[in-house]
Image: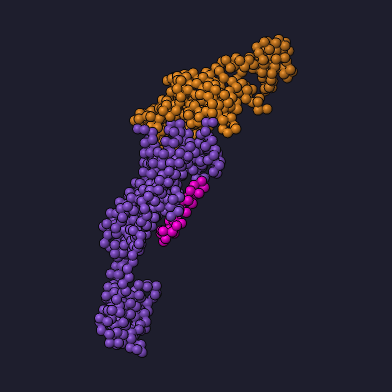
Amino acid sequence: MNNFWIILFHTYLDKLKSKSFIITTILTVVIVLALTNIQNIIDVFNKDGGKETVAVLDETGQLYQPFKQQIAAINKDIKLTTYNGSEKEAEQKVKKGDIDGLIQLRFNQEKLPEATYKAMSIADSSLYTDLQTGLQQLKMTLAASKLNLNQEQLQKLNEPVAFDKVALEKNAKTEEELNQARGLVYVLLFIIYFAVIMYANMIAMEVATEKSSRVMEILISSVSPIKQMFAKILGIGLLSLTQLAAFLLVGYYSFTRNMESLAAGFGGVFGFGNVPVATMIYAVVFFILGYFLYATLAAFLGSLVSRIEDVQQMITPMTLLVVAGFMIAMFGLGKPDAPFITITSYIPFFTPMIMFLRVGMLTIPTWEAVLGIAILVGTIVVLAIFGARVYRGGVLMYGKSNSFKDIKKALQLTKNE
Amino acid sequence: MVLKLEHVTKRFGKFTAVDDLSLVIPEKEIFGFLGANGAGKTTTFRMILGLLDPSAGKISWDDKALNYSTSHLVGYLPEERGLYPKLKVRDQIVYLARLRGMQKAEALRELKFWLEKFKVPEYENKKVEELSKGNQQKIQFIAAVIHKPKLLILDEPFSGLDPVNVEQLKDGVLALKEKGTTIVFSSHQMHHVEELCEHLCIMHRGSPVVHGSLREIKRAFGKKNLLIHADFPLESLKDFPGVVKAKPTMEGVLLQIEGENVAENILKGIVGKGFIRKFALEEPSLNDIFIEKVGDSYE
């Protein structure tokens, strides 16, 4: 077998079998499973049917029945019970946890309903809001009948106004589509961000370990440093794809199984219901390109240090670039068509995240995406050629070396004047 | 298959690490490469291995350039010792051997052979970081020779080893030589070089100051050592014509003299002065030559 493949598979298998890789993969898979099963998990904790019991102290004797009907229409999980004891006793029951809340219904001077709601805490706003909405509707009905409005007139009042939105730009996304895309892009951005930081770190560490343990001298006498560098980048790239594939498979399987409960819950918010194929393809393309860009950078930075402790210091500027790209992307999620976002999406170090954000959220002409990818690929090629030269000299340099002056020194080593 | 270096020069910016070095290293021989720290030994080795390109000159093996396509013919033990600390000896050696073009089964067979030879067969499944430094060095030596190279470069192979391990490693080196491997090795310890090498080269600040076969070098050096033990004072001999250096010892004096005739004159001069227990004319040691050639220019 060719040396290139020997190194590639050695790197891949060595890392694949490492404890840290197995642990992070399992942990992340557990998190993915937990997220996709969130509805089931919530249900488990709400064993009492998730019902909330509210005692109704109806001082009027007329409001309880209509109020109960209104609430049933709004939220089936709220259970109302009429309560005939004193207010004090009811409060005691709330404190003991027998019931979740206590609502007192009465008429005001105009014979319209009003209420006081008592609960241990009023932070649970959804229950309180539902109760209020129910009472509001009841009040509307009562007020309407007082004014002698019939059902038809009432309906007219309640009817929402017709309001159409028309985007003049072709294929422009609607607000809902944008919201959906935002969730998906957000998750994918996170994946790109973490993968780039994690695997670029891994490469820099790998190179620095070989250098600091001095096994590098033997390696470079058998295989050219450039071959080694790319075999390593591809080996770890294969590792990252393996991990990503594991996440996606588990995530997809678990997601489709829980599709119904999720679509109703927060899955809809994240726009997973109908994932656009183009977005996924772009995500994979930018994931791979982003990886190569930063992996090449990390490999040659790693080749400059001779002690593992210096690795972090050396790659900090690179990490900051990734973080900056991610920050801009986070800002761009809210305003993807800002000129600032458009410009930064062509800066190669930011392209993987920001151009992806733009193709994911806006409908931009294909040539823009292609131009961004072309600039990115060009940068990777330049960086690979330059990085390979630095790497070749860098691996031979020992001693105190943790400044960027060393790049020049490393280049000088490979020169043959 | 002769290793030839022709007018090889290597500059790093303004600094010249190796200056116009020409060497011919005969086949199936052990060649000693000496020099003080920073004399350019490691740089020369790196150029021979093709890790660095010479600024000028040419290096050839069997009239062909050495590069990565010939790496399976070359073995290298770097001065800086190191292996993957977390890998088992077996995985490590197999990986490095495969990179030199070996098959896995063959590499395992050779590994067993060498571990037996170094009397450490139980290390096969141990991690390198669990081994002592001397034993790590043995493993690294195995990594350098496992693929039966035609040319073996050993950069300070014996440094930091106890005498027993030095003997084992020396046996290993000699066994390889018997099988026809050309070996170039560098050392600070002159007695190792004297014991093993037929030809040698002493480097000083990038230039070869002495080069040739051990016997010729000693002969060309001319000077000899004269050891005298006697019952009467010998201090006055340091001013005797032809005496270069005089070093008093516990029982007498050690003189460095310009030639055999000086010894004859000295003997004539001291006979009759008292009892002479020892009068020995010795070949100069490599140590003397090294110190004279390299040490003097330090002053």
Is residue B221 something one can see in this rendering?
Answer: yes
The foreground one among B79 and A362 is: A362
Asked if residue B110 is positioned above or below residue A162 in the image, the reply reads above
The foreground one among A132 and A80 is: A132
Q: Magenta stretch? A: A313-341
Query: Residue sitting at 47 percent across and 54 percent down?
Result: A324
Q: Which chain is purple?
A: A
The foreground one among B298 and A106 is: A106
Q: How many marks?
A: 0
Asked if residue A110 is positioned above or below residue B152 in the image, the reply reads below
How far across and down, in percent of the image, does residue A106 sit?
33, 86
User: What type of secondary structure mainly makes up the magenta span?
Assistant: helix
Q: Is residue B61 magenta?
A: no
Query: Residue sitting at 69 percent across and 20 percent down?
Result: B246
Location of residue B145 (image quadrant): top left
Task: Classify residue B63 as left or right of residue A152.
Answer: right
Q: Which chain is orange?
A: B
Describe the colour scheme in one phrase.
by chain
Query: Residue sitting at 40 percent across and 52 percent down?
Result: A355
Task: Classify residue A95 as left or right of residue A81.
Answer: right
Is residue B122 something one can see in this rendering?
Answer: no
